[in-house]
Image (cartoon, rainbow, N blue to C red):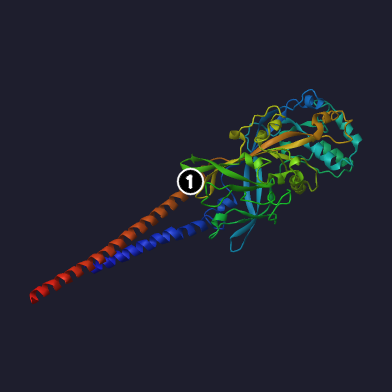
Amino acid sequence: MGTKLIIGLSVGGLLLLALGLIARFVYPLIYNNESSLADGSMVYDEWQAPDYPIYMKYYMYTYTNAQDFVDGTDPKPEVEQLGVLSYRETQVKFDLEYVDDDKRVIYYNNKSYVFDEETSTMAENDTIVVPNILLFTILATYQETLNWGFIKFFANRDFNGGDPDYVNAVSPFYMVEAGDFLWGYNDNLFLEQLHGLDAEVPTKFGLQVNNTNDGQYEIYTGKGDDNDKRGIVEKWDNLTALTFWYSDTCNMINGTDGTIFPVDVPKDERLYVFNTQICRSIFLEAEEDQEIEGIDTTKFVAPSEVFEVDFEDNVGYCTGGEKDECLGNGLLDASKCYKELIKDQTGQSLDISLIISSPEFLYCDNNTIESIIGFDPNPAEHETYLNMERTSGVILKAAKRVQVNTNIKYFNGIDSLETMEKIVDRTGQSGQYLVPLFWGEESLPVDSKLTDLVNESTRVTTAVLVLAYLFIAFGCILIVVAVALVVYSSTKKTSAYEMDKEGLLRRQF
């Protein structure tokens, strides 16, 4: 009976221990494959074509003193945030090609936008007064070949009067419908008339594009033992490094695209995100733990150091890689990058001036902030952040916020234009004045589908690990009991033998 009990305890203990160890060490491998981006995995469908709400919101400015600023009456431009144009964003990854035993995937990510009236506070046909970036782009690109007499014809129109069809097309500021300003339009009178002069200018000019992609990606899927690389960008447009900046460090492609991250993300490590919208990689750091619908998350934010000239190797983002050519803290001259991106849109290489910053010049120097009347930056409204459940690497809430700015410039040969003659007084020694165009927020609000997915994954993982540790614990207990019984049985036999031996000796004497 004792032997059978010991055997039973030993076998049961070993079986429980084996099951526990299998659950503890094999399940993570199964989980890693199910949480990878390989076709057929648990997260594949939501990654390939997200079915949760993503919004692209444009916060539109209008200039309330444009004419007085140009005339020199007001020393600074004054802006008013007129409202929000909100669009429901749809993403679909296509032309997927898996390589290296499905450990990497090559694809394009198409983004399309549909105007969402419910989450907007203004209409696309609302009129705004904005810097005339089209004019300055045309002047910079074609200033050697333009017909100045034609431009002067436009310039003599009153800024707020005259034929409304002209909307003063060659003023430093002009009136335009907000939707047309963002997306462009084909009946732009300025471009039409230039085409009539056989000028090789684009037929359409907008600052945003719809129903298109931002290039080819090659990323790690996280399959197998590579889950700590899930989503990491290996190549973009077949490049392992960018060519826009002036140092190898600044040209590095680091991190993911910001929509997916590895699992088990350490809290004390930087999260790197490669963002084609600003043509560079940035990092985010943990700020605080926050609970979202019962799920523990960590809020990561893009700190001010990301945008500081003196931080680490940021000088490589300055023109020529020279510190004295930097625009200042919080400002990034992305003109070289956007020149290539717009070339894909228009088919032409345009000398566009685009300066990227955080909304309302957050993290910029005070003199930059104070150059615009109406700005009051604060992190709560203007910072870039994300809330991540770090075990699964899933983003439950996020906002990527970027402001697009341009320079009002003085060009030789146009000082005689009535609406431009005083622009040199506004630009000072630098020959240019930085003005904001709009700021955008790509946001992921809290969605029950995502939280349910994370909750279910967390429950299953927790249950498996709890059972694993229970099996290991009970298995070890049964094995210890079995060993103890063996020792006890052996000790008992030895004691009986000694007693029998002692009794035999007594009988002999």
What residue occupies the far top of the structure in this picture?
Answer: 73
Which one is nearer the viewer's eye here, 87 or 256?
256
Instruction: Locate residue 188 relative to residue 490 in the image: left or right.
Output: right
The quadrant the N terminus occupies is bottom left
Which one is nearer the viewer's eye here, 38 or 475?
475
Q: In this orientation, does residue 397 appear?
A: no
Q: Quadrant of residue 218?
A: bottom right
Percent position of residue 378, x then y:
61, 32
Percent position of residue 14, x then y:
34, 64
The quadrant the C terminus occupies is bottom left
What residue occupies the far bottom of the structure in this picture?
Answer: 508
Residue occupying image coordinates x 46% and y 47%: 455
Decide: few, some or many residues near mark 1? Use Cα within 10 Å; few <14, some 14-19, many ≥20. few
Going by the numbered disc 1, the residue's amino acid type is Asp
Please say if 376 is above or below 10. above
Percent position of residue 296, x then y:
48, 43
What residue occupies the far front of the structure in this picture?
Answer: 509
Q: How many marks?
A: 1
Percent position of residue 207, x then y:
73, 40
Residue occupying image coordinates x 61% and y 63%: 100
The residue wearing badge 1 is: 452
